Amino acid sequence: MKKKTMCFVIVLTLVGLNCLSAQMTKTQLQEMYVSFLKGEGYNPSVDKDGDVNFTAQGQKFYIDVMADDLQSFRIVLSEFLPMGSNRLKALEAAASEIATTKAISFNLASNNRLAINSFIFIARPEDFKTHVKRMVDNMLIAKRDFLAKL
């Protein structure tokens, strides 16, 4: 009987922890992201839109803080890439990168420039920590290869 009770308590504790993380506010998410990035040696800041900005390998990124979906995590390489005069070639290069680089996408901004995004699903908000470096690396690889194809 003690084993069943102990298992029940552990399950309730885990469920309770999940519920706590499921109730994080935008401010709590921002604080968690900023704290982690500072610990990794980045220089993060929160902008007026509530995004967490940081620089990695000389490039500017931001984390899209999504308090309405705690199982989503998105980083954007915020320095937009020009489409150039050959729009079709740029779109083909972007499509090639999407097909060969994991968890990235390109978005066309209204100013005819491309942004690179990395989006993943996570079980808990704090799980982002194990993915940041790879997401950043993948976006930088995609940018390098995209520019080489233009």
Image (spheres, rainbow, N blue to C red):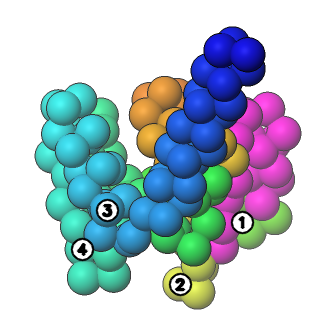
Query: Which circle's residue, 1 or 2, is located before the other in the chain?
Result: 1
Residue appearing at x 31%, y 62% in the figure: 28
Query: Which circle's residue, 2 or 4, is located before the other in the chain?
Result: 4
Query: Which circle's residue, 3 or 2, is located before the other in the chain?
Result: 3
Q: Which residue is mark 2?
A: 111
Q: Position of residue 149 (x, y in %)?
A: 68, 41
Query: Which circle's residue, 3 or 4, is located before the other in the chain?
Result: 3
Residue appearing at x 74%, y 68% in the figure: 87
> Closer to the observer: label 1 or label 2?
2
Q: Which residue is mark 1?
A: 86
* Label annotation for residue 3: none
Query: Which circle's residue, 1 or 4, is located before the other in the chain?
Result: 4
- Give amino acid for label 3: Gln
* Residues at circles 1 and 2 in contact by the CB criterion of under 8 Å: no
> Closer to the observer: label 2 or label 4?
4
* Residues at circles 1 and 4 in contact by the CB criterion of under 8 Å: no
> Closer to the observer: label 3 or label 1?
3
Which range is magenta? 91-108
Dot 1: few (<14), some (14–19), or many (≥20) neighbours within 10 Å? few
- For this rendering, which residue is in front, 144 or 72? 72
Local SS, label 1 = loop
Dot 2: few (<14), some (14–19), or many (≥20) neighbours within 10 Å? few
* Label annotation for residue 47: 4
